[in-house]
Image (cartoon, grey):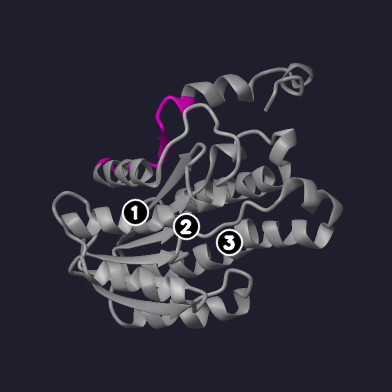
């Protein structure tokens, strides 16, 4: 169960090698979290992440999980919930893709969509059902400001995140009053391995800053979290720009 401050004692991470997810896990372990499940494709990176978290004092287990294999989600994630209640699920997997390449390769573009959206719909519904059955818990979904309005520079990624964001909001409405809390996190440009080599964007942030915002959002039982907070105003303005003007912007 969550503590008096709304922080989880047990955590399931979908996307167990995500830098944002691991920064969040480290922060929560420093507060109250004692049990962590890292779900991801079996790899040395997943094992290393588990060892690092164990070094902080948590009991950490790994579970094989592939966003691109929805048929296996219920069985894989069901095993986690069968071990005991999960206070928080952090849906943190995703892929940026390569816009220029993916425009010329529809199969590659579909993989981006399947990872960021289809896989998230499947895993999100499986976890939501399990959380509802236990009667409590939070589902935290890492979305992106890219989903607010698709840009020419990354509309494949942005459209997949738009779908994820809409899905998570609707799921939150569906679960309202059940004891399950859904929180959508919308970071801007985060400096990680995934964005290495890309031009720096205004209001860029870090995995640690996103983790701090997640913690604050949990304490406040927020439904939407922007990182940094100033992006709420920026994206509101961009969302309402006339299309002809928007497409002229260097974004």
What range of the chain is rendered magenta? Answer: 220-232
Quadrant in the picture for residue 7: bottom left
What is the number of the mark on residue 121?
A: 3
Question: Distance of mark 1 from mark 2, alpha carbons?
Answer: 11 Å
Q: Are marks 3 and 1 in contact (CB under 8 Å)?
A: no
Q: Quadrant of the N terminus?
A: bottom left
Q: For the residue carrying disc 1, how many other residues have a C-alpha within 10 Å: few (<14), some (14-19), or many (20+)? A: some
Q: Is residue 152 left or right of residue 23?
A: right
- Mark number for residue 92? 2
> Percent x, y for residue 142?
47, 50
Give residue 232's position: percent from left, percent from top. 47, 27
Closer to the eye: label 3 or 1? 1
Q: Residue at x 71, y 20 (%)?
A: 249
C-alpha span from label 3 to label 1: 24 Å
Given this view, does label 1 or label 2 mark the residue nearer the observer?
1
Q: Is residue 205 visible?
A: yes
- Taking 97 as reference, is 101 left or right? right
Q: Label 2, label 3: how many angstroms apart (C-alpha)?
A: 13 Å
Above or below: residue 227 compared with residue 195: above
CA neighbours of label 2 inside 10 A, class few (<14), some (14 to 19), many (20+): many
Question: Helix or strand or loop: what does disc 2 sit on?
Answer: loop
Lower sequence index among marks 1 and 2: 1
Residue 129: name its quadrant: bottom left
**Mark 2 or mark 3: which comes first in sequence?**
2
Q: Residue visible at 62% across and 25% down?
A: 239
- Name the N-terminal-most of marks 3 and 1: 1
Residue assigned mark 1: 23
Closest to the observer, 104 or 129: 104
């Amino acid at each position: 169960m969550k503590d008096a401050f709304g922080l989880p004692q047990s955590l399931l991470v979908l996307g167990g090698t995500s830098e944002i997810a691991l920064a969040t896990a480290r922060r929560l372990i420093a507060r109250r979290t004692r049990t962590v499940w890292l779900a991801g494709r079996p790899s040395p990176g997943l094992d290393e992440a588990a060892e690092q978290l164990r070094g902080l004092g948590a009991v950490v287990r790994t579970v094989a999980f592939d966003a691109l294999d929805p048929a296996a989600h219920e069985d894989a994630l069901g095993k986690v919930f069968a071990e005991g209640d999960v206070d928080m699920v952090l849906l943190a997997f995703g892929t940026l893709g390569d816009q220029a390449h993916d425009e010329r390769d529809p199969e590659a573009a579909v993989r981006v969509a399947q990872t960021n959206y289809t896989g998230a719909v499947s895993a999100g519904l499986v976890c939501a059902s399990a959380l509802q059955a236990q009667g409590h818990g939070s589902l935290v979904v890492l979305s992106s400001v890219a989903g607010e309005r698709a840009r020419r520079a990354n509309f494949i990624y942005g459209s997949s995140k738009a779908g994820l964001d809409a899905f998570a909001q609707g799921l939150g409405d569906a679960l309202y009053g059940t004891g399950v809390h859904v929180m959508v996190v919308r970071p801007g440009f985060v400096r990680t391995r995934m964005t290495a080599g890309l031009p720096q964007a205004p209001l860029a942030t870090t995995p640690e800053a996103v983790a701090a915002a997640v913690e604050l959002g949990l304490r406040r039982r927020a439904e939407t979290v922007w990182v940094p907070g100033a992006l709420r105003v920026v994206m509101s303005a961009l969302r309402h720009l006339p299309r002809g003007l928007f497409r002229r912007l260097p974004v």
